[in-house]
Image (cartoon, helix red, strand yellow):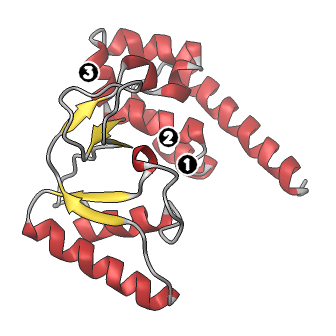
Amino acid sequence: MGYAGGGKENPTYHDLGDHAETVQIDFDPRLIAYEELLDIFWQSHNPTSPAWSTQYKHAVFFHNDAQKEPALASRERLEKSLNRKILTEIIPYTGFYRAEDYHQKYKLRHAPELMAEFGKMYPDYGDLVDSTAATRVNGYLYGYGSLENLQAEVNAFGLSVSGKERLLELMRKRDQRMREFSGVS
């Protein structure tokens, strides 16, 4: 989590200037294509809704023409398929500022047993924030991903047996709440 797209040096949550809240994704194109990331991005928000403010705008920040062209093309395809104007911006990357610690790994920080385990694995908080395992667990805690997917990869996170059991328990509870909310038993 961080801030990008504006001209202010070292923005903060309470002094953003013209930056937007955003995430920065480092990826290996040998493992996932940029176009696949764009597909996920378009599915993760309503690109036809206007932003409440600059802080919450929808945007792809491209680093070069190799990213700009597919981003523009994917937006065009989506606009045609929806037959609606896409309001998500495609703009040049000018820098990324990491948000304050209290904005990082929010759901993980509210699972104290899991946070303690990751804290031992990553005594430097910056390393924890950058950890793929911590990011994936935080995503699961937010509700992204299925229990089945978690069960398939839980052993890769470096958690203790009790940590894995706690994470799976939290996911089962989340799934139960979702079934109750939707009226499905």
CB within 8 Å, label 3 to label 1: no
Q: Nearer the viewer, residue 82 or 9?
A: 9
Q: Is residue 176 left or right of residue 74?
A: right
Residue 151 locus on image (x, y percent): 56, 43
Q: Secondary structure at mark 3?
A: helix
Q: Residue at x 40, y 27 (%)?
A: 13
**Residue carrying label 3:** 127
Q: In x, y percent, where is residue 173?
A: 75, 35
Q: Amino acid at mark 1?
A: Tyr
User: Dot 2 lies on which element?
Assistant: helix
Gap between marks 3 and 1 measured at Cα: 22 Å
In the rendered structure, which amino acid carries the disc numbered 2? Gly
**Earlier sequence position, callout 3 versus callout 1:** 3
Q: Which residue bears the numbered disc 2?
A: 139
Residue at the disc numbered 1:
144
Disc on the earlier residue, 2 or 1: 2
Instruction: Verify CB contact (< 8 Å) between mark 2 and mark 1.
Output: yes
In which image quadrant can residue 133 be found?
top left
Q: Nearer the viewer, residue 81 or 173?
A: 81
